């Protein structure tokens, strides 16, 4: 198991993950980052949210944005 961190970047704001989470590999960590982005993107401005997936040494492995489907979901809810 490897330890990964998931920092949130939202507009000019940044929340640094100090605890992290264990995952089997990078793919699993990136998938988890995508789930975080989609979950938060459901309630917020999904276009500006980015999740930086990083290794313990600080190396950024991936930058993940919310799935476009979340934006369509928000527009559909607003249009009702």
Image (cartoon, helix red, strand yellow):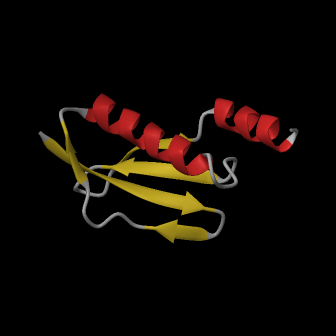
- The structure residue drawn at horizontal position 41% and vertical position 42%, both measured from the top left corner, is 33
Q: Position of residue 42 (x, y in %)?
A: 62, 46
Residue sitting nearer the eye, 71 or 9? 71
From this viewpoint, which residue is outermost toward the left? Answer: 1
* Left or right relative to 77: residue 44: left
Dividing the image into 4 quarters, which one contains the N terminus?
top left
Location of residue 62 by image quarter: top left
- The structure residue drawn at horizontal position 22% and vertical position 55%, both measured from the top left corner, is 56
Q: Position of residue 6 (x, y in %)?
A: 37, 53
* Left or right relative to 18: residue 42: right
Q: Position of residue 69 (x, y in %)?
A: 66, 30
Residue sitting nearer the eye, 60 or 48? 48
From this viewpoint, which residue is outermost toward the right? Answer: 79
Q: How many numbered dots are placed on residues in this image?
A: 0
In the displayed structure, would residue 55 be above or below residue 12? above
In the displayed structure, would residue 51 be above or below residue 79? below
* Left or right relative to 58: residue 44: right
Q: Position of residue 61 (x, y in %)?
A: 37, 42
- The structure residue drawn at horizontal position 48% and vertical position 59%, both measured from the top left corner, is 8
Dividing the image into 4 quarters, which one contains the C terminus?
top right
In the displayed structure, would residue 15 be above or below residue 2? below
- The structure residue drawn at horizontal position 38% and vertical position 47%, both measured from the top left corner, is 53
From this viewpoint, which residue is outermost toward the front? Answer: 80
Location of residue 28 by image quarter: top left
């Amino acid at each position: 198991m490897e330890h990964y961190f998931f920092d949130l970047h939202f507009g000019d704001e940044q929340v640094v993950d100090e605890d992290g989470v264990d995952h089997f590999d990078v793919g699993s960590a990136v998938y988890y980052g995508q789930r975080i982005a989609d979950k938060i993107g459901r309630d917020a401005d999904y276009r500006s949210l980015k999740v930086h997936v990083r290794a313990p040494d600080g190396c950024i492995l991936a930058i993940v944005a919310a799935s476009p489907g979340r934006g369509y979901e928000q527009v559909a809810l607003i249009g009702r």
